[in-house]
Structures are given as C-alpha cells and as structure tokens.
Image (cartoon, rainbow, N blue to C red):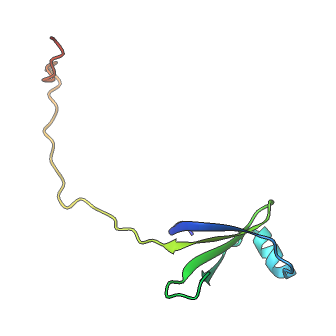
Amino acid sequence: MLDLRLETVYALDPEEVSQELTSRLAAGEIFRFSFNFRDDYRPETGFLIANETGAFALIGVPVTHTWCSLQVLVDLPAADEDSDDDDLDFEF
C-alpha cells in the first residue's frame, strides 16, 4: 500500500457486510483489489481498510521506485587538525 500514488479516497457506507470481513478489517487486515470507475483501459489499484471511524477504499496507481547508488566512493583528504584556517573570510 505504501507504493501507491493515492488519487481517490472513498468513505464506504455498505448495506451488507459479512461478519468474517468485518472481523478481519477490525483486526487490521488490508485487502487489495482491482478498481475501474469507468470502463477504460487503465484499471487502478484499490485497498480496502477500516478503522474506528468506518471503512474506506483507497484508490490509486502503483509506483515504481528507481534507487540510486554510488558507483565510486570518494576518498576525502584527512583533516589537518593543527590548522585553524578554513579558507573562509568574513571580513569586509
């Protein structure tokens, strides 16, 4: 669910819910489903969740992450502890 670009949140007011689904939602389970508001080529992903306020459908599009990594590590020169000169001059 954390890889979802959230687009819509629906507060659900169900007419009838099975006792099993109610208890599983109350236990913190999250259900994933395919969602398509309009009959088009792009189905979205939905997650059914619940809390003490009610049941909600979170609708969005999954995103993929491209992680970057260092190709080459840089060797920094050792700091000269004897020198107080830091090459910054704040005098006018």
Residue pictured at 16% horizontal, 32% vertical: 79
Q: Looking at the image, is 12 positioned above or below residue 44?
A: above
**Percent coordinates x, y for residue 80 in the rendering:** 14, 28
Q: Nearer the viewer, residue 68 or 74?
A: 68
**Percent coordinates x, y for residue 20 in the rendering:** 83, 81
Q: Is residue 64 left or right of residue 82?
A: right
Residue pictured at 79% horizontal, 79% vertical: 21
Q: Quadrant of residue 9?
A: bottom right
Quadrant of the snapshot with the C terminus? top left
Quadrant of the snapshot with the N terminus? bottom right
Q: Is residue 70 left or right of residue 41?
A: left
Q: Looking at the image, is 78 positioned above or below residue 31?
A: above
Q: Nearer the viewer, residue 8 or 58?
A: 8
**Percent coordinates x, y for residue 22 in the rendering:** 82, 75
Q: Looking at the image, is 54 positioned above or below residue 37?
A: above
Residue pictured at 18% horizontal, 16% vertical: 90
Q: Quadrant of residue 13?
A: bottom right
Q: Is residue 74 left or right of residue 15?
A: left
Q: Is residue 84 left or right of residue 56?
A: left
**Percent coordinates x, y for residue 16 in the rendering:** 86, 81
Q: Nearer the viewer, residue 33 or 68?
A: 33
Residue pictured at 62% horizontal, 81% vertical: 37
Q: Looking at the image, is 23 positioned above or below residue 76?
A: below
Number of marks: 0
